[in-house]
Each structure stands twice: as C-alpha cells, then as structure tokens.
Amino acid sequence: MATNSVVVERLILAAPEAVWHALTDIRGWEGTVSGVERIEVLSSGGFGVGTRWRETRRMLGKETTEELYVTACEPPERYVAEADSHGTHYVSECRLLPAAPERTTVRLTFAAEPADGVTGVLAKVFGRLGARTARQALAGDLDDIAAAVERRAG
C-alpha cells in the first residue's frame, strides 16, 4: 500500500512549552484554529496517549467529522494522532524543534494510507488533491496557533 504524506513547517516566536500548550489544548481549538468548527473530547484527563476526540472541519465545501486518538506523546517535543475513516488510515505527527530562545519550529506531518488498495490514475489524482488540501489546512492551522501563541507571548 502506498502512503501519501504532507509535511508543513512554521517558526513560532515563543518557547516550546507555550507552543506545546496551544497544540495540545484541543478543547481550545474551536476558538483558536479557524479550520475547526467543533471539538468533542471523548476521553477524560489531560492530553496524552489514549486521548480521543471528534473534530469537525469544513473541507472542500463539506462538513467532515473525524475521530482521532493519540498514540504517542512526548511533551513538549512530539505527539502522534491517528484516525481511521472511509477506508483510509491517517497518521498525524506534531514535532516541536527549539530554534532559539523563545522560538520554536513546528513540523506537522500528515500521512494517509488507503486500506482498500486503491491504485492507478484515480488514486494519484485524488492523492494530489488530498495532499494540496491537507497542506493548506495544516499551514492554516499553524498560522492560527502561531498568532494565538505570539499574541499571548507579546
């Protein structure tokens, strides 16, 4: 099975701990991340392995809701969230790289692996469209997180 992945990076003018808090405060994403319409947290406790939530976004003009779950968490350096939807397994990794005092580079990697073995031209066309859409959404999310964190730090 072929995996399609997208990587987006952004420098945020804040310390890793402040960036980590914004990236893992999933209850606060509705008010911070413009691409997120609704969040429903399904687990109790703080953010970590086992945290589950439903995230509703508008993608390509349609509302879509996915259930995500955290499978790895190493504060304040990285976490991995996964989802299974419509025959595809999704893996998102968020990695924080200290760049300098009060500066953090955030690298988001999003990968999709079709479970049904779809191949050929059709898969490549939808793969490119999906990759472009994912890249735009991830970049927008990072811009929103950066604006919120930098506003608080400033």
Image: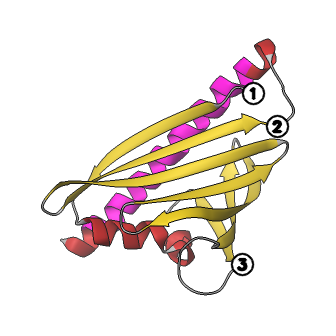
Q: Indicate the amino acid at tag 2.
A: Ala
Q: Is residue 63 something one can see in this rendering?
A: yes
> Which residue matches tag 1?
1
Total marks placed: 3
* Image quadrant where residue 118 sits: top right
Magenta span main SS? helix
The reply to whether dot 2 and dot 1 touch (C-beta < 8 Å) is yes
Q: Amino acid at mark 3?
A: Leu
Q: Quadrant of the C terminus?
A: bottom left
As measured in the structure, the alpha-carbon distance from the residue carrying label 2 to the one carrying label 1 is: 8 Å
Q: Position of residue 100 (x, y in %)?
A: 14, 55
- Write the residue at 68% across / 46% down: 90
Q: Earlier in the sequence, mark 1 or mark 3?
A: 1
Q: Which residues are magenta?
A: 124-150
Q: Secondary structure at mark 2?
A: loop
Horizontal arrangement in the rendering, residue 79 relative to residue 118 (left or right):
left
Q: Which mark is residue 42?
A: 3
